[in-house]
Image (cartoon, rainbow, N blue to C red):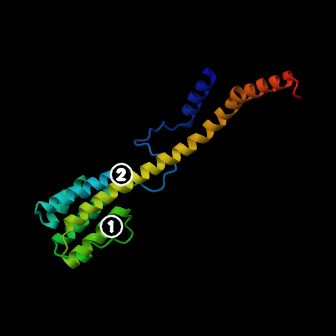
Amino acid sequence: MILAALALAIALLLSGRPARVPKEVRPVGRIAPQAADPLAVASSLDVLAVCLISGMAVVTAVRATAPSAPPVLGDLLRGAADLLALGADPARAWAPRPGEPLDESSTALLRLARRSSSSGAALAAGVTELAEQSRQETGHRAEAAAQRASVVIAGPLGLCFLPAFVCLGIVPVVAGLAGDVLGSGLM
């Protein structure tokens, strides 16, 4: 152990370069950024709906919601608010940007806002419904994951307990019955 540490120290000294410590540690093997927490998205949609219900203008409500929203949704909201404040057509402001990665909730919000701007339907009710739908989908995904985990756990437990049950439960009963049957002279 001491020789290995000594060899490492000598190798570092002979390399001539000072050891660098990375400023930030990144996980290995991660290609895409982590998806936003669906409950955080639902909560941001709730904030947007409350702002709209309270009577705020769409631009003001969107700007108020954007800072607390998850990154993807926040960028989307900031971009839409900027375009709306500049007087852009709402259908253009709520259109997806090319090359921008969007999750299901963001895509649904864009579709809902475009539809609301063209039909005049209240945006707040749709956003509230979208937030509730996002929470329900999250609950369903969590329940499905728990059910999959219970199935995965049941297999090894069955493989462990079944032989023990056979050896300690069934074999003694069969051996006892066989002894009684053979001892009684029936066979």
**Regarding mark 2 in the picture, which secondary structure is present there?**
loop
Badge 1 is on which residue?
108
Q: Give the residue drawn at x 26%, y 75%.
A: 115
The disc labelled 1 sits on which kind of residue?
Ala
Can residue 34 be seen here? The reply is: no
Q: What residue type is labelled 2?
A: Asp
Please say if 187 is above or below 16.
above
Q: In which quarter of the image is residue 74?
A: bottom left
Q: Disc 2 designates what residue?
A: 37
- Viewer-nearest residue: 79 or 53: 53
Image coordinates of residue 109 in percent, x first then y, are: 29, 66
Q: Distance between the residues labelled 2 and 1?
A: 16 Å
Q: In which quarter of the image is the N terminus?
A: top right
Q: From the viewer's perspective, is 176 left or right of 5?
A: right
Question: Does residue 32 appear to the left or right of 62 in the view shown?
Answer: right
User: What residue is at 64 percent from the left and 32 percent from the top?
Assistant: 161
* Residue at 80% over, 23% down: 180
- The residue shown at (52%, 50%) is 29
Q: In the image, is residue 113 above or below residue 73?
A: below
